[in-house]
Structures are given as structure tokens and as C-alpha cells.
Amino acid sequence: MHEVAALRGAVATALERMRVAGGVRVTHIQLALGASGHFSEEGARQHLSEMLAGTAAADATLGFDWIPARFQCFDCLRQLESCAPVESLTCPQCGGLALQISHSDDCYPSEIEIAFAEDRERARVG
């Protein structure tokens, strides 16, 4: 449920930035998501399409930037960053099991494109 709340917050932020900038609709939302959170692109798109319905961002395109988690190999102690699923990560150096040592549950709009009524121009708000 934490993920849904984070997505709601990102949608609220995008709509608020549009309102403050004087825009009439959001045309694109680029989200930064922590790869080690419980997000998948498919799941995030599904939740977002439901949340955006009936809003000024209903037709916005969506893009995703994944923030990697940090791992350490249990065998050789090498540290690495990856966006791979936690359960399938092995060390590229020795093939050992890599354990997650830090992660990010971030979810925020890193870029928002908005349209204005007077000239239909798009503007990026970041």
C-alpha cells in the first residue's frame, strides 16, 4: 500500500506544479522510482492510469527512470549498483549471491510537461 500512496503523492505534485505554472493540462510525467521498492513499470502504469483518469493529466504520457539499489557480494565482498530484481542478482565478478545493502523507495516526478491555454505550447517543469 505504501507504493500506491507514493504514486498518489507524485500525481498530486504534478497537478500542483501545473496549477502553479498556470497550465491547463499535464502532457507528460517522468517519474523517478526506486528499483528496490515494490514497483514494477506495469504496476505503476496501471495504478497511475486509474489515478489520472478525470484529471488534467488524464492523457499524459508516462516515462520512468529507475534509481538503482546498492548490493554487496556475500562471497567476494564486491559492491555494485543494480536495478535488477533483488531475488535474481548475482555478483558479476564471482557469481556469488549479492545482498542488498541500501535501497530507495523514492517515487517523485523528475520532469513534468504542461500545456497552456493561450498558446498550446508545452513547457517543462522540473
Image (cartoon, rainbow, N blue to C red):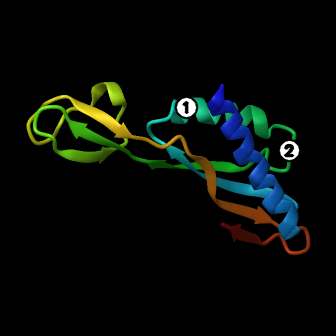
Q: Give the Cα separation between the discs numbered 2 and 1.
A: 21 Å
How many callouts does the rendering have?
A: 2
Q: Quadrant of residue 19?
A: bottom right
Can residue 120 be seen at all in this image of the molecule? yes
Residue at 74 percent of width and 46 percent of height: 11
Percent coordinates x, y for residue 80 in the rendering: 25, 47
Q: Are marks 2 and 1 in contact (CB under 8 Å)?
A: no
Decide which of 16, 41 is in the foreground and name it: 16
* Above or below for 81 versus 2: below
Q: Quadrant of the C terminus?
A: bottom right
Instruction: Please give the name of the residue rendered at 80% of the width and 65% of the height, measured from the top-left corner.
Output: 115
Checking the image for residue 9, the label placed there is none
- Three-letter amino acid code at disc 1? Glu
In the rendered image, residue 58, in percent from the top left (x then y), is placed at 79, 44
Residue matched to label 1 = 42
Disc 2, SS: loop
Residue 46 seen from this side: no
Q: Which mark is residue 55?
A: 2
Q: Is residue 122 left or right of residue 56?
A: left
Q: Quadrant of the N terminus?
A: top right
Residue count near mark 2 (Cα–Cα under 10 Å), binned few <14, some 14–19, many ≥20: few
Residue 45 in picture, x, y percent from top left: 62, 36
Tell which residue pokes out farthest to the bottom in this image: 119
Question: In the image, what residue occupies the spot 72% across and 50% down?
Answer: 60
* Left or right: 113 in relation to 54: left
Q: Secondary structure at mark 1?
A: helix
